[in-house]
Structure formats: C-alpha cells, structure tokens
Amino acid sequence: MSARVEQANAEVLRQCREQLGFEIDEVARKVKSIAAIEADELKPTFKQLKTLSDLYEVPDWVFISDAIPERFRLTSSPSYRLFKKAGAPLNPKVNKLLIRVEQLRELVIDFQEDQDEQSDPFDPPEWTEDVKTMAKRVREWLELDSGNRRHWSFDELREKLEQKDVFILMTSKYNGPWKFSVEEDFRGLCIFYGLLPIVVINDSDNKKAQSFSLIHELGHLLRRESIFDHKSILDDDKWDRDDEERWCDELAEEVLMPYELVNPNSYRSFNELKDKDIQVLAKEFMVSPYVFCFRLQSLDLITEDKANKFKRQIKEKSLSQKASGSVPISRKRHKEALRQFGSIYTKTVWQAYYDDELDLLRLGKLFELNKLHYVQEMRKIIPSTITQSG
C-alpha cells in the first residue's frame, strides 16, 4: 500500500482546486478519491499529491501548508483580477495559463537583474483614437515601410515586437498543458505591463491569421488594456463587437493592409474577383484570405453579399482540408520550444545557464524539454547575442 501524507491540508487542497475553477468531478478523473481527500476522510498518497501539483500549478509542499502562500493565490495575479473584473469567460486551462505566463515573465525579470540587464520600458508611439494615424505611427515604430518591403510575415512581426521588449509566447499545436483550441478557447490574449507586456498567440490558428491576432493584441497594449480575446472578426461579425474590439480590429487591418497599398486602381473591380484571386492577394499581403475579405469590405471595395460569398467559400475550403487530414510532420521539440517561448525568454534563460546560475537539467525543465539531447539541439539555434561568460 502506498504511503499517505498525513500532513496534507484538505482545506488547502480544496482551495487550490476552486481557485482554478475545476469542478471536483473533473479532478476525480485524475485522482479518483479527491472527494474523500477534500473531506479529510482520506489522506492522499505522494503520487496523488504530485498529480494534483501538476494539475493546480503549485509545488506539492503547498498542500501541507496552513494556507495557500500569497504568491500561489490566483486572486493575487494582476491579470486574473483584471480579467475577472471584466467578466472574461475564463476556464481552468486559461487560469493555469495566466499563472504560467506571469511566472515566466517574473523569471525573465529576475534573471535580467542578476545579469545587470533589463528590458526597456514599453514605449510605443503616442496613442490616438484615429486608427489611420495610429496605424501609420505603428508601421513607422516597427519600421514596416523600410526599403522595398511593405508586407511582413508573422515571424517577422513577432521579431520586431520582441525587439521592442514585448514578451510574446505561443501555445502549442500538440497535446499538453499549452494546447488550446481556436474554436473553444482563444486566438490571443494580452496582459499590459509598463515593463515586458505579455502577448499570447494560439499556435493552432492559421499562421497568417496569427499576424492579425498579434497586431490586434498590440492594439490593446497601446490602449493599456489586458484582454482575453475569445473571438475575433475571424469568428463573428465585426460590426457586433464592442468599440474597443472594433478599434483593435481596424488597427490590425490598417497596419497589415494599409489603404494606399490595397489600391483599387491596381486591380480590376474587386467585385469581379474570384475566390482564387482573393487567395493570391491575401498571400501578397501575408494575411489569411478571410481577413483580406474583411478588409475589402471595410474599404467598401466589395459588397457585403460578395464578401459573405467569399468568406463562406473560404470556410468551406478550410473545413474540407481539416476533414481530409494532413500528413504527419516529424516533431522537432527544440525548435518548438524556441517558437513557443520566443527570443526574450530564450536569450535570458540561456544566458543564466552560461553564467552558471542553472545546470543543464534545470535549463531543460525551464523549456519543458524532458530529454537533454533536445537542449543540446537548441544550443545550436539560440540567438548569437548570447555570450558564454560562464
């Protein structure tokens, strides 16, 4: 019989579950006796505490404390308070994500202090309600009009924002705690801070749609807002969205597809275009065809009926592709981790390793890599600005 932890605090276990929003039946799928444990009729085993520790995002020693330590109380999280106040429809998975991304941000700040470095304060262009003016300022700030370039991929846009010290994280396309559904969870969220503001983008979404979500979330940061975007114009009629959401939608459209570049004189009448023409133009602007349809409709370059027809065709094609399945792709965990955590986190954590603040095992855990050879492979592709000072 497995040894049981007599010091386990049933009340703390219950509070850890409730603060994340888990129903007891959900937890019972992993720990069958959780009801009896919370009623203090049965003490948990060490294995059960480890399972609950992973589920509740707290160290297992918390469960033998007299109360949940302040730093592990979800209600003390700045983003949780803001989202809760706004009535955001948060679920346990999203609550866990909020805890995790704030922990990562705090880790970066702590390591940067040890390295006598610090990210610059978030210093975007001066905010104005006028979308066209704001979009122009953003494009200048990010140098999107430099040289002959006018259109940028998601990865390029992310890099430019990371250079401005915006902390950008990605969810995972694969099963695990970072896996989220676009249809049921979110496309993007942001947490405003004057230092290292956070943006999280759902990596299960279409990559070209991610560009729109990224600039949309930037719009909220420009407004100094922390927002959980469950839906976007990619899901709903944009005209039914509130003023702040519509403003961020319009900013993303204007930044990614400026009016002067979506020039009606460059093409024949947009109303004469076919679905394949929309695909080509969207590819040119590095956005999804669905987003490009909205842009044409916003600029009154196509009728509402034409736009709805295009969007319906695009959705049907997307559903057809999903139904047909795709060829499995060989996973490269070290590259996934780099994409998920981004250059700010990667640079800071690897520098801590070279400064002898971390061993290789701990380094791997911070990237959620369970095999050391993944860490060794990541070493080959980390930013060249990291110095081996250790």
Image (cartoon, helix red, strand yellow):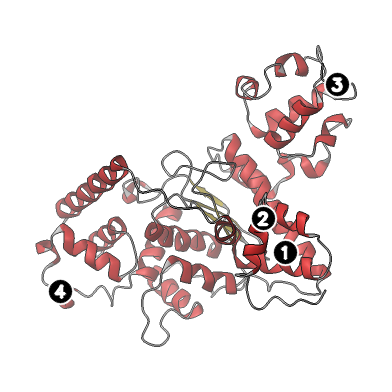
Are circles 3 and 2 on residues that touch, CB within 8 Å? no
Q: Earlier in the sequence, mark 4 or mark 2?
A: 4
Q: Label 3, secondary structure: give it.
A: loop
What residue type is disc 4 on? Tyr
Residue sitting at 58 percent across and 70 percent down? 162
Q: Earlier in the sequence, mark 3 or mark 2?
A: 3
Identify the residue position indicated by label 4 in the image: 267
Q: Label 4, secondary structure: give it.
A: loop
Q: Which quadrant holds residue 64?
A: top right
Answer yes or no: is residue 319 visible.
yes
Mark pair 1, 4: CA separation:
49 Å
Q: Which mark is residue 3?
A: 3
Mark pair 1, 3: CA separation:
37 Å
Mark pair 4, 3: CA separation:
74 Å
What residue type is disc 2 on? Phe
Are circles 1 and 2 on residues that touch, CB within 8 Å? yes
Residue sitting at 82 percent across and 16 percent down? 1
| Mark whose residue sits in front, 1 or 3 | 3
Q: Name the quarter where the C terminus is drawn.
A: bottom right
Q: Residue 24 placed where, x, y %?
A: 65, 21
- Mark 4, Cα crowd under 10 Å, few <14 / some 14-19 / many 20+, is few
- Mark 2, Cα crowd under 10 Å, few <14 / some 14-19 / many 20+, is many
| Mark whose residue sits in front, 3 or 2 | 3
What residue type is disc 1 on? Val
Q: Which mark is residue 367?
A: 2
- Mark 3, Cα crowd under 10 Å, few <14 / some 14-19 / many 20+, is few
Q: Label 1, secondary structure: give it.
A: helix
Pick the residue in front: 330 or 46. Answer: 330
Q: Residue 57 placed where, x, y %?
A: 71, 39
| Mark whose residue sits in front, 4 or 2 | 2
Q: Earlier in the sequence, mark 1 or mark 4?
A: 4
